[in-house]
Image: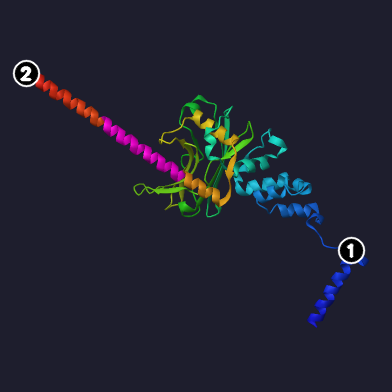
Amino acid sequence: MAASGSTRLQENMMDRDSPACGGMGETGIDDLPADVLSLVLRRLDGASLAALGCASSSFRDLATDPETWRGLCLALWPSVARITDPDCCRDGDSFHRALFADAFPFPAAAAAATVATALPTWLVSAVDLHHRGVCIMSRVVETDASSAWFLGSPFRVDALLQEGFTAPSAIAPAELTLSWVLLDPASGRAVNASSRRPVSVDRSWLTGETVARFTVVLGGVALDAAVTCDDRYGHVREVSLCMEDGDGSGVSGRDGLSVLAAAMAAPRQGRGAEAEARAARWYAEFVKGKSARKEWKARREGLVDLCCSGVGAAAFVGFLVMLTCR
């Protein structure tokens, strides 16, 4: 009975597809209503959505839906909900679509060598800290980058007040993820300033604090996004973004803005786990080079000290000989 029922069903389907029944044929994806397709596309990730927009003109219209891109951005960066859309959006893109294209991929490693024409005068930081997939901090920080104090001091942006905050449970620093998006409202350009996953976790046994670093290396400059926490009690003390050069010295605010402007204008490097692994490798090479330079400077200073000691000893012996001869 089951076999004959299946046979009748197949015959009925064949009859429906026959020319005598109007030739319904197969239903393609283009035949689906636009609102249904829009709901389906909202379940895609940003890269897949952008690729689908290149398939046809109808898909391009659906793939540029501002609400779809807004949902993607808010899913990755909840703090973006508190950012006002800037007036300038390039090439007709919506704000969230342009933001995703800028901030989701990693900046190119050679971005620091690019010459930038104008420096940002105002920086907006969208900072989101997650622990095991749960958002424990989401903040927007606005920084006046045109003040003499900022330009002359070492580059630094703090995303936390001095007292910090306590997470709902104990923190495993290695399982933290940090998104730090820097936006220039004047140009509408943005850049990802963190490696998302920690590239190093350093614990101080004396103070009990742990520093998880989410560093992105641009040429010879490191954008060092760091989270300082007491993992025993789940207290996050500090979330900050600094810059340092290959010698471990701080970068001034003016030079830091030049690096950021170049990174915003430069091409993007990649996305996903492969890009995160590449960022960790660049950080390891940066730390290795910094250690080698410190060792070379220590040897050079030791040699200089030895020469100075030799000259001083020779002068002292000569003075004694002069006194003896007299």
Q: Regarding mark 2 in the picture, which secondary structure is present there? A: helix
Q: Is residue 285 visible?
A: yes
Residue bearing the label numbered 2? 325
- Along the line of sight, the residue nearer the viewer: 69 or 55: 55
Q: Specify few, some or many for label 2: CA neighbours under 10 Å numbering under 14, 14-19, or 20 or more.
A: few
| Residue 146 place in picture, x, y as percent | 55, 26
* Mark 1 residue type: Gly
**Residue 42's spot in the image, x, y percent?**
70, 52
Magenta residues (range)? 283-304
Residue at 66% from the left image edge and 40% from the top image edge? 98
Which residue is outermost to the top? 326
| Left/right of residue 188 with respect to residue 273 in the rendered view | right
Q: Which residue is mark 1?
A: 23
Q: Is residue 176 left or right of residue 41?
A: left
As for residue 300 lying within the magenta part, the answer is yes
Location of residue 189 (image quadrant):
top right
Residue 165 in sight in this render: no
Secondary structure beneath dot 1 equals loop
